[in-house]
Image (tube, helix red, strand yellow):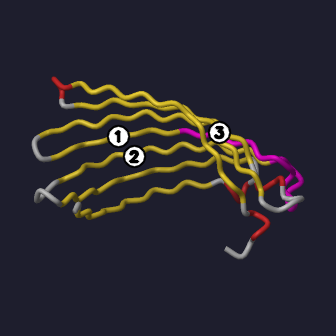
Amino acid sequence: PNQETRDADRYVAGVGWIQARVEASQLLYGSVYLSREVPTHAGAAYAGHSGLGARIGSEWETGSLTWFAQAQAEWRRYGGTEPLFSVRRADDQLDLSVGVHWRPAPAWRITPQLTHTRNHSNVVIFAYQRTTLQVTARREF
């Protein structure tokens, strides 16, 4: 939060598609998008990037459960040379998610979700893998 030179405004434009397969209680969806992050500080082009992303996924119902799976990829090319590494940064990120929505009562939804993220970067400190398990509870009014 204290690195204001890395602040940027993000813009995203894309198209999506969704298809409902009523006979199978299933949704299929996909999208592609372009993104751009514009640094808010002069001289910080390395903090902004141009990107291309794609997402595919599905949801299907089995009784009171709605299962889902999704894959998303984003390719980012940064706008300037990283000050500490003297290279222009490039990241390729892949996210895979699976989970289930459970409705124990009409206004409630409990969602456990497992997500794996892999970010490959030519600047070693930005390369990582992360696996998260989260459980959310939502009440609708």
Asked whether the residues under the numbered discs 2 and 1 touch, taking CB atoms below 8 Å apart as contact, a structural biologist would say yes
Residue type marked 1: Ala
Q: Looking at the image, which is closer to me, 27 or 131? A: 27
Q: Looking at the image, which is closer to me, 26 or 16? A: 16
Circle 1 Cα neighbour tier, 10 Å, few/some/many (<14 / 14–19 / ≥20):
some
Question: Which one is earlier in the sequence, the residue at label 2 or at label 3?
Answer: 3
Circle 2 Cα neighbour tier, 10 Å, few/some/many (<14 / 14–19 / ≥20):
some
**Distance CA(mark 1)–CA(mark 3):** 21 Å
| Residue 45 higher or lower than 6, as above or below | above
* Residue 13 image point, x, y percent: 59, 37
Residue drawn at (45%, 56%) of the image: 131
Circle 3 Cα neighbour tier, 10 Å, few/some/many (<14 / 14–19 / ≥20):
some
Q: Which residues are magenta?
A: 73-88
Residue bearing the label numbered 2: 97
Residue drawn at (86%, 62%) of the image: 84
Residue furthest front as drawn: 141
Residue 6 quadrant = bottom right
Residue drawn at (74%, 71%) of the image: 3
Residue bearing the label numbered 3: 75
Of the 4 image quadrants, the one containing the N terminus is: bottom right
